[in-house]
Image: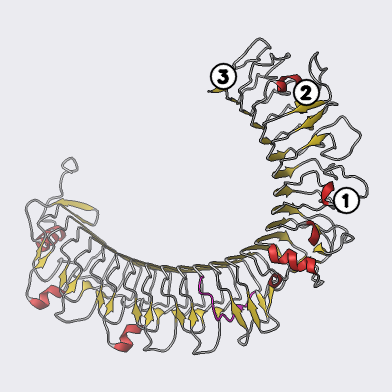
Amino acid sequence: MMFMLLVSLEWEAQVALTSLEELSLKSNKSIVKIWDKESNLNSFQNLKDLRIRDCGEMESIGLPSIFLSLVKLETLSINNCKKMQQVISDGSETQGIPKEIITFPNLKRLQIKFMENLKSFYDGSCKMAFPSLERLELNCKRMTKFAGGTSSTAFFPKTIEFPSLESLWLYELSDEVRVLWDLPVGEGQGISSNPLPNLKTLVIRKIKLPSIVFPSLSDLTVEAVGDAKFLFSSSSENEGCVGTFSQFPKLEKLWIQGCAGSVKQQFIEDDGSTAILNFCGQLRSLWLQSALNMEVVSLHLFKSLRDVYISDLACEYLFSADGGFLQLQSLEVLRIYNCPNLEVIIRGGDKDTTVVFPRLKTLALQDLEGMTKFCSISDIPSLERLGIYSCNKLESLFFGEPNQVVELPSLEKVTIRSCDAIKSISTTPLKASKLRELTVSNCPEMGWLLDGEPNQVVELPSLEHVTIDECDAIKSFSTRPLKAPKLRELTVSNCPEMEWFLSGNSNCNADLELPSLENVIIKKCPKMKSFSPVVLKAPRLRKLYVEQCSKWEWLFDEESNQVVELPSLEEVTIKDCDAMKSFSARPLKAPNLRKLWVFNCPEMEWFLSGNSNCNADLELPSLENVTIKDCPNMKSFSPAVPRAPKLQLVYVDNKRYRIAEIEDLNHVLISANSSEQTAADENDL
């Protein structure tokens, strides 16, 4: 049974809902307390889930005595109650209620967040026990202690027990909190002194960790404090450090953020001890964020890392391959953002260095102002996603000997944006048989995406999407012949030097076959002469959009009787093409063409001139809509007779013409231009 309370109400002791399991109080500004008197011990005996949110006038839940009736409570969540200073109010105990301890026998999750004035959970003299609590979340910026009643300055005094706690999230507490737990004197390094022996996840900000061993901790998030030279070391005498290697025997995930020290820092103290080898060997995931004074990271010591996220560091390199070989067997994800001093990711990673990432799947580099190169790669067989953003000194991602082939057999997606100096993805031949998506944007020095020997075929059997935008120097996708049987989407825009999308096929006298191509968009390429110097075969092409290509004269310009067969073509748009004379100089077969738009093409005389070469009518059996605007030289649609039995409307220079049982589109255009056909009535349309 669930009950949501949205009205002004205070329950007195005589109210009993013995079957109620879930209670939610939300957005009520009148409730001061849920219970204002001692409750009947059985009044809410089956309540399991209590959630309170946005109750601005609520001062507390009630007296300690009411929790004796909440024996089955498993979840308690309190959020954004601005007046509440204590969850349990400090009042006199009633007869029959034990004064020495308050027990929450089945409570598993306790969440208290965004409480502006909360100072404590309970400030009375009773001890508290949470024998089943597994997850505790606190985010209260004025909270100075969890419980009072003692002279202890610790946030969690000895009067509180969490024997089953596995996850502790301390997002934000009062700046006055300096000590988390009371520890027995002289036992600070012993496992027996840890009050949370089962803790697996710890999130803590602006509070120094105690010098105790965390025997079960696997996930640690901490905002480092102090001016320690090393964040982790073998010695506890390293003042201000996060901790020692021996404190975390099972740590697998580490997130360090906001290191505020004023001295130059290193991530770990590499003393060659067994403790550091164990520490580095067990870590699986590492996030280093906003450590602006950290100069040395030494990630090559962490042989078991799977996931690395680096952001806002001062270091000049991350890995060292000084011995000429670097192998990270487990690394799967590497993300590096906004490290202005980073020159190379791998120090010593020159052409004589062997670097192997056998399991790396994701590589993302962003805002690395000083990076000039990644490394010479001999083996990244598992790389699937590659993203390079705003790395303005990077000329090439991979480099090596001229005949060395970069093998990336698992690569599926490549994105390169805003890299001012990059000239190519690789200085050596690239093999990427699973590449599906390629995006290059705002790379002014990129000349060709793929370069190499002129007659060597670029085989991209899985490529489906290509986007090229704002690449000032690019002349062609590739200087080599291309085989891309699955390419479906192609977008090229703002490339002022591009003459052909693909120039390489002319070297081998072969047609350009793109059997899966469906959508083509080409915009603002003023030097574009044609799609390719050779015949394009695209039987599945459905949509074609060409805009501001001032040198393009024919979309298909081979003057011969060879028919342009576009059996799937449905829509064609040609806009602002100053030199465009015709869609094609060859005969056209486009049985599914439905819509045609031509705007501002001052040199176009016919939409299609090619069919006159074969003395055949122009059959357009599916054409329904034609729009032609600002084409002053177009006096006729085609030299051949166009047949368009489904044509309904023709728009010529903002005038609409209804076509009724007329198949000859030439006649319609001639009539429109000579004003012999009357514009259709707007009401008719």
| Residue stretch in magenta | 371-382
- Residue 131 at what x, y percent from top left? 73, 35
Residue appearing at x 7%, y 72% in the figure? 616
Q: Is residue 231 shown to the viewer in this render? A: no
Q: Reading the chain from its start, which is encountered first: label 1 or label 3? A: 3
> Which of 238/337 is in front?
238
Instruction: Point out the image quarter for the C terminus.
Output: top left
Q: Residues within 10 Å of mark 2 (few under 14, many from 20)?
A: many
Alpha carbon of mark 1 to alpha carbon of mark 2: how far?
33 Å
Residue 43 among magenta residues: no
User: What label does residue 89 carry, if any?
Assistant: 2
Q: Residues within 10 Å of mark 3 (few under 14, many from 20)?
A: few
In the figure, 628 relative to 47: above or below?
below
- Most distant residue in the top direction: 14
User: What label does residue 19 carry, if any?
Assistant: 3
- Residue 245 at what x, y percent from top left? 79, 61
Q: Is residue 228 shown to the viewer in this render? A: yes
- Residue 415 at what x, y percent from top left? 49, 67
User: What label does residue 188 carry, if any?
Assistant: 1
Tag 3: amino acid = Ser
- Figure quadrant of residue 106: top right
In what element is the residue under mark 3?
Answer: loop
In the figure, 251 relative to 478: above or below?
above
- Figure quadrant of residue 631: bottom left
Tag 2: amino acid = Ser
Magenta residues: mostly which secondary structure? Answer: loop
Alpha carbon of mark 1 to alpha carbon of mark 3: how far?
47 Å
Residue 374 among magenta residues: yes
